[in-house]
Image (cartoon, rainbow, N blue to C red):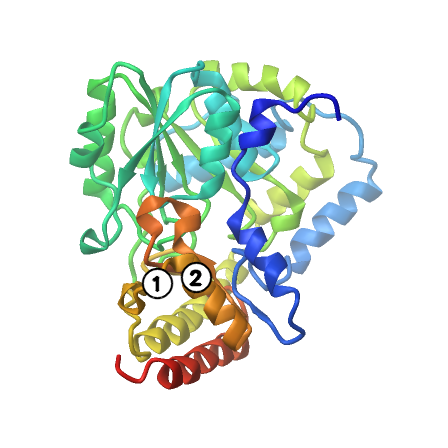
Amino acid sequence: MYHWSELSKNYPASSIRKMAKLAAQFDDTLMLTMGEPNFETPEYIKKAGQDAIAANHTHYGPNVGELSFQQAVAKKYTDQTGIPFDPSEVMATFGGTEAILHVMMAILNPGDEVIIADPSYPNYLGQIMLLGATVVPVPVYEANSFKMQASDIEQVLTDKTRLIILNTPNNPMGSILDQSDMEAIVALADRHQIAILSDEVYESLIYDGKKHFSLFQIPRAKENHFVVNSLSKTYAMTGWRIGYVVGNKDAIDRMAEFREGIGFCVPPFIQEAAIAAITGPQDDVRYFLEQYDRRRHIIVDGLNQIPGFHCLNTEGAFYAFPNIKAFGKSSYDFAMEILTETHVALTPGSAFGKMGEGYLRIPFAESEEVLQEAVDRIKAYIIKAYPNL
């Protein structure tokens, strides 16, 4: 190769996939690295996609998405928030990740600053780098249940701040922002004329009777801010690659222009399956939540019975984020030790930012049997290897 771009030389590699690759050396590895449901896509959703293929919905579609898809998403947010949404305020995307990129492309210039939580979803970092913007991490703390606070954001604002990224429910920490948290951040952003991107792909996964509070439940938020969502986690549709961004019509029009040069359109038959998911019965969504809740207790309660582990109760999403500072090792070294000694693959918290050091991320999206076996292996090893804890 004659030349490599600076971006290609410096783009952050996925530590999640790195750990998964290392784990492949063992035949009996329990893979607790990827944030992917182990459920299959519900049959009525698959049938809608199959029927759309049979009906030859396999040609190019509008850049912004099929009108029927836009209508389904607009109705979802109208029903959810009580605020009217128009189909022109919706764009279909290749999963939530591409939706995030389109929002950034519409807002950011090189040198602009983007505020993200630390720890946070690693792909935010790479996409910000891709556009030549600057990441400004805001530490979130276990003592505050890993919730981003308006007061912490305000301390790092500059005249270059253009975007604040929120993620609720949160990956990797499993925390949620409640109404007061969200309202304070929106008020701060509006005072300084800064856009917010609220990544709400785990909206259906909230426990203990709590309810998701969306950015768009705040009146007039859609005028200047964005919600990104996906069907991947809610409906076990990770491989379908279907998500969307919702925001004001002018911004959506600009993003649709980008779509012309980035994949052109989400396949119409996939959008048909997504429409079936959004508008169809939600029994499977409720069943998934019940199962994740059972699994949450296996992991969180199980880890808290292991000497040296301290794990907050997960409020949303399907991740536990245990504190392992008592072991006096880096999160990477400790994760490698657990992998080598127990054949349980976990992701070091440092993969999600500086503030993730001293923690592990553990998805509980696997079966109860796998999760219980993982806890048992780790507990047996820790009791033997660290008798003084």
Q: Quadrant of the N terminus?
A: top right
- Foreground pick, 134 / 209: 134
| Residue 88 picture location, percent across and down | 52, 21
Q: Are marks 2 and 1 in contact (CB under 8 Å)?
A: yes
Q: Residues within 10 Å of mark 2 (few under 14, many from 20)?
A: few
Amino acid type shown at disc 2: Asp
- Foreground pick, 145 / 216: 145
| Residue 292 falls left or right of residue 241 | left
Residue 61 lies, with reference to residue 58, above or below; the image says above
Q: Which residue is mark 2?
A: 333
Amino acid type shown at disc 1: Lys
Q: Quadrant of the C terminus?
A: bottom left
| Residue 223 falls left or right of residue 3 | left
Residue 302 lies, with reference to residue 38, above or below; the image says below
Whether residue 203 appears in this view of the structure is no
| Residue 155 picture location, percent across and down | 17, 29
Q: What residue sits 31% from the left and 80% below the top?
A: 305
Spatial CA distance of label 2 from label 1 is 6 Å
- Tally the marks: 2
Q: What residue sits 46% from the left and 23% below the top?
A: 104
Q: Secondary structure at mark 1?
A: loop
Q: What residue sits 15% from the left and 34% below the top?
A: 151
| Residue 300 picture location, percent across and down | 35, 71
Q: Which residue is mark 1?
A: 329
Q: Secondary structure at mark 2?
A: helix
Residue 228 lies, with reference to residue 5, above or below; the image says below
Whether residue 59 appears in this view of the structure is yes
| Residue 312 picture location, percent across and down | 27, 64
